[in-house]
Image (tube, rainbow, N blue to C red):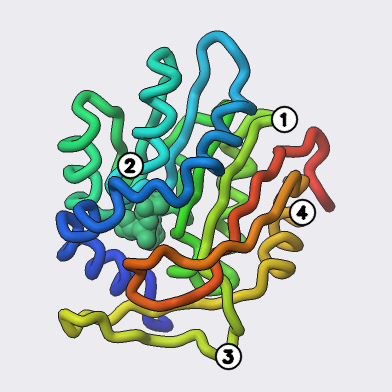
Amino acid sequence: MSEDHNAESVACFDKHAQRYAENYFDLRNYDRFYQALLERLPSGPVRLLDLACGAGNVAAFVRQARTDAQILCVDQSAAMLAAAQQRLPGIATEQADCRDLSAISAGFDAAAFCFGLSYFNDEDARQVLAELARLLRVDGSLLLSTISGDPVDSGPQLSSSGDRVHMFYRQPETIAAWLNEAGFSVLRLDRIASPANASQKTVDVVILARRNSVPAD
Ligand SMILES: C[S@@+](CC[C@H](N)C(=O)[O-])C[C@H]1O[C@@H](n2cnc3c(N)ncnc32)[C@H](O)[C@@H]1O
């Protein structure tokens, strides 16, 4: 069986969850995109999934504006979920692998998948997008952000603490095409510079998409 690079990355996030939360939880760089997702939420009771939630940045933004929202934070790292619970007392969490979300009931009005895609190889990345399409209701909204780059630069990277994370880079057009394949329509796609305190300087891609009524062939 081939090595699961993703498991190694999750172990690194688990080990450094508190530091990650301290560095990124208060970052305001993505608020305008979180706001765009918020504005697409229908009035009345809503369900939102924060997938690969980390310390729960999207969940926090949505919760302060929509106190009625039913939010589920999902991550494979128990320490990240603990960091999310510490910052968002009472938030619902579930430890699960993004590639298999069969334990989670479908029908979400919206989902966020922020900065998770680059820890998956192409096959697994497409699997995660298919899982998101399955969990969102028709016309539901998806906010996806990710580091972009040239696929040839993909590979292991050593963090300052010496831990290894395997990064998979891809171009925005590839991600948009995969979203279409999975049953989404891309509503807008933005390219922005990575935050000043990011471990590497990259171009981030932020996509707002809508779940189609008819699954793509
Ligand atoms: C860069 S952090 C992003 C956290 C948060 N979404 C944000 O925008 O700040 C990536 C997160 O993806 C999670 N992750 C990576 N692989 C995963 C998997 N297979 N299943 C669930 N979570 C995963 C990590 O544990 C980590 O919390």
The quadrant in which residue 195 appears is bottom left
State the separation of the CA atoms marked 1 and 3. 35 Å
Query: Taking the image as four quarters, which one is ligand 1 found in?
Result: bottom left
The quadrant in which residue 134 appears is top right
Disc 2 under 8 Å from ligand 1? The reply is yes
Residue plotted at (28% across, 85% down): 158
Disc 1 under 8 Å from ligand 1? The reply is no
State the separation of the CA atoms marked 1 and 2. 24 Å
* Disc 4 target residue: 180
Give the mark nearest the N terminus, 1 or 3: 1
Give the mark nearest the N terminus, 4 or 2: 2
Q: Is residue 133 left or right of residue 63?
A: right
State the separation of the CA atoms marked 3 and 4. 23 Å
Of residue 188 and residue 213, the one placed in the foreground of this image is 188
* Disc 1 target residue: 139
Which residue type carries mark 4?
Answer: Asn
Q: Which mark is residue 9?
A: none
**Relative vertical location of residue 87 with respect to residue 202 in this rendering, above or below:** above
* Disc 3 target residue: 152
Residue plotted at (48% across, 48% down): 30
* Disc 2 target residue: 56
Of badges 3 and 4, nearer the viewer stands 3
State the separation of the CA atoms marked 4 and 2. 27 Å
Which residue type carries mark 2?
Answer: Gly
**CB of mark 1 within 8 Å of CB of mark 3?**
no
